[in-house]
Image (cartoon, rainbow, N blue to C red):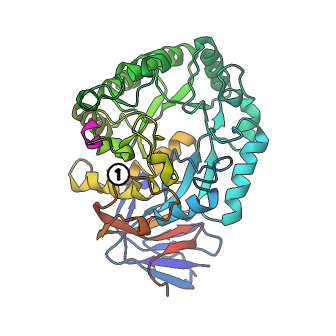
Amino acid sequence: MSLVIKGGHLIDPAHGVDGKKDLFVDDAGFVVGVGKAPAGFKARKTIEARGRIVCPGLVDLRARLREPGLEHKATIESEVHAAVAAGITTLCCPPDTYPVIDTPAMAQMIQSRAWRFELAFIHPLGALTQGLEGKRLTDMEALDEAGCVGFTNALAPITDTLVLRRAMEYAATLELTVFLHAEDPWLRNSGCVHEGESGTRLGLPGIPEAAETVAVARDLALIEQTGCRAHFCGLSSARAVAMVAEAQKQGLPVSADVTAHHLHLTEHDIGDFNTQCHVRPPLRGTHDRKGLRKALKTGVISAICSDHQPHEPDAKLAPFAQAEPGISGLETLLPLTLKLVNEKLLTLPEAIALLTHKPAEIIGVDTGHLGIGATADICIFDPDARWTLTEDKLVSRGHNTPFLGQEFRGRVTHTLIGGKLVFGLDTVD
């Protein structure tokens, strides 16, 4: 249904738009006017956005939806509802489902399940190796044709360097992007926290920074050898992002993202064994957090993601080392990013770019912008709304977050997908 989003402050970093402009959407769900209606346009509905920010729908590069295989934690249905409540219109699903996304049939099943709900778009990441076992390569060409937007072995390490080289060569031949989780499994060993002050105080086995940097060094050597386009997922240390920055200066086709929680928390937030802060990679020191923030500002890191991992309550009740790692992060992705704006680290357009067109470019999907002809995937939020995160406000089935009880500034009021209102706190005329 044709509509106009009226009186809002439109921010579309991909097109350099930052100002008060109306946005016009046609019956087919495409943007047909920015600031001015096209000739003959007649809106059948109006969304009043005065005092609000209108921007492209958010793009999240990593969200585990737990289906298939772990439906006791969450489902595609529950998590896409959480996504649109958070202004997220596009999600990437890693392949570590049960069964693994290593065949075209699995990739198509994930997408068809998402299409049934007509909410957030889900783009699967295909497995690099069959069963994520690190031995035999998948048919990446067939997975690409089935809709996979990249390839990764998720958190399962490929310990055979020759297998990883062959995977990168295969991906480079087809101009596909490989998503890398840089972690040396032997250096990680049985660690569960950063090897630092807090881990030592609590007597918990640590994961050294070298577990990440050694893996980054290996991967960069193979990227240079093969010419593969690669993306580093969830870097956690200042040294690792410095290595990626140097590789970018040398012209290597590499990009990187960071999770929202690593930009705000450190090892000290673990306190006295707070399992909600058990994540992988671990929360590191203050120096590392500063390095990640600097890399955002300089453009070395080009996306912020939620790394959404919903869990049932029991998963976090075990002792720290045995508790399952991960944070339910969809609904804090935008407010945590806006917090960086309030802290004067980023401008609002810079922050929105890290959540929209920049991650969209990494996966090669035409979304994250609101130019003429673009699909009207839109997020509208009130930048001044103050609210407290409580369990009853979480739409996700996973309530495992260390941010419960915290006050945030900035809240989504409307989400549109293809011009269709799929979430709204206010009425629409």
Q: Magenta residues?
A: 267-271
Residue in the foreground of this view, choosing between 184 and 85 = 184
Question: Can see residue 258?
Answer: yes
Q: Main secondary structure of the magenta part?
A: helix
Residue 171: x and y in percent read: 64, 26
Residue 342: x and y in percent read: 23, 56
Residue in the foreground of this view, choosing between 132 and 139 = 132
Residue linked to disc 1: 402
Locate residue 156: give its quadrant: top right
Magenta span contains residue 101:
no
Question: Can see residue 349?
Answer: no
Q: Residue at 45% of width from left, 47% of height from top?
A: 316
- In the picture shown, does residue 257 fall above or below 335? above
Locate residue 278: give its quadrant: top left
Residue 174: x and y in percent read: 68, 28
Magenta span contains residue 268:
yes
Q: Quadrant of the N terminus?
A: bottom right
Query: Which three-letter amino acid code belongs to the residue tagged 1?
Result: Pro
Q: Residue at 39% of width from left, 52% of height from top?
A: 401
Left or right relative to 203: residue 365? right
Q: In the current view of this chain or complex, which residue is farthest to the right?
A: 105
